[in-house]
Amino acid sequence: MTKVRRKRKAYVHGSFPPLGTVTSPTIGTNAASYYLNRQPRTLRGWACYENGPIKPINIFGKWHWSVAGIRALLGGGDA
């Protein structure tokens, strides 16, 4: 009997607007991971262990990330 190897699906980000056009003060984990070019689980790890370059805000049990903090981290704006 041979083992069947399944291909893993590559993680595909949703479609998000350019960061410069985002007007809300915070964004969700999936959008933040898109802009930071990281997996969402990496950002969740930063949130849980409090060891990431930016700190999230917990709103009703969901992690939200500061748009100003992401812009500052990427070197594209004031924090």
Image (spheres, rainbow, N blue to C red):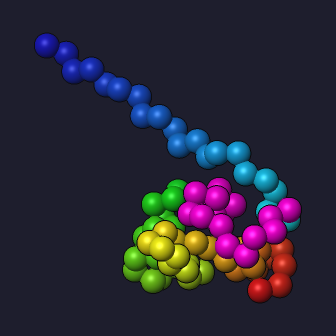
Which quadrant holds residue 67?
bottom right
Q: Position of residue 18 (x, y in %)?
A: 81, 56
Q: Is residue 11 shown in magenta?
A: no
- Along the viewing direction, whichever of 65 and 5 lies nearer the viewer: 65
- Along the viewing direction, whichever of 24 and 44 lies nearer the viewer: 24
At 49% from the left and 69% from the top, the residue drawn is: 62
- Along the viewing direction, whichever of 57 and 48 lies nearer the viewer: 57
- Residue at far left of view: 1
At 64% from the left and 58% from the top, the residue drawn is: 31
* Left/right of residue 66 with respect to residue 39 in the rendered view: right
- Residue at far front of view: 60
At 51% from the left and 59% from the top, the residue drawn is: 40
- Residue at far bottom of view: 79
* Left/right of residue 45 with respect to residue 71 in the rendered view: left
Q: Position of residue 30 (x, y in %)?
A: 58, 57
Q: Position of residue 16 (x, y in %)?
A: 73, 51
Which quadrant holds residue 77?
bottom right
| Residue 38 visible at all | no
Quadrant assignment for the N terminus: top left
| Residue 79 visible at all | yes
Above or below residue 10? Residue 74 is below
Magenta highlight range: 21-37
Q: How many marks?
A: 0
At 69% from the left and 61% from the top, the residue drawn is: 35
* Left/right of residue 63 with respect to residue 28 in the rendered view: left
* Left/right of residue 4 with respect to residue 76 in the rendered view: left
Above or below residue 59? Residue 38 is above
Q: Position of residue 21 (x, y in %)?
A: 86, 62
Quadrant assignment for the C terminus: bottom right
Q: Is residue 33 shown in magenta?
A: yes
Above or below residue 25? Residue 15 is above
